[in-house]
Image (cartoon, rainbow, N blue to C red):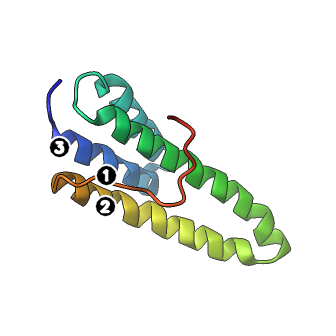
Amino acid sequence: MREDKQLLMLTHLSQLLDLVTGIGGFIVPLIIWLTQKDKVLGMDAHGKMIINFQISMFIYSIIAIPLMLLFGLGILILIIIGLMVLIFPIINAIKVSNGEIPSYPLTIEILK
């Protein structure tokens, strides 16, 4: 296994493709993780963390839709989710480049 901080950083930043393509922020990190998890040191843990974060944000978005129709609270939740999806991949890419352990808040651990 080789150590490749740049690829780990790119994997975290690839989540931002959601802002451009709508779905690339899930597929690209998934492909990188599946193809590199046995070749790059730490990729398995980072990939699972990213996929768990993406799935969690999707679940929270689905929950926010009925709340938006019922109480209007869903709009606030969707804004918070949008900010989290924008900010945390950047923060965690910086953490990876500095050798720190990244973390995503409010993530449901689906893949262990």
Q: Which residue is mark 1?
A: 13
SS at mark 1 in the image: helix
Along the line of sight, which residue is nearer the eye, 26 or 33? 33
Q: Indicate the position of residue 108 as horizontal and vertical percent values.
A: 57, 49
Q: Disc 3 and disc 2: Cα gap in Å?
A: 14 Å
Helix, strand or loop status at disc 2: helix
Q: x, y (%) of residue 92?
A: 31, 57
> Which of the two labelled residues, at mark 3 and mark 2, occupies the earlier sequence position?
3
Is residue 99 visible from the viewing direction of this image?
Answer: yes
Q: Is residue 83 left or right of residue 95?
A: right
Up/down of 90 relative to 18, above or below: below
| Residue for badge 3 | 5
| Left or right of 85 in this view: 91 | left
Q: Residue at position x 17%, y 43% from top? A: 5
Q: What residue is disc 2 on? A: 90
The mark that comes first in sequence, 1 or 3, is: 3
Q: Which residue is at 61% across, 68% downward?
A: 78
Residue 73: quarter of image: bottom right
Give the image quarter of residue 69. bottom right
Q: Position of residue 96 (x, y in %)?
A: 23, 52
Disc 1 versus disc 3: nearer the observer: 3
Which residue type does callout 1 highlight? Leu
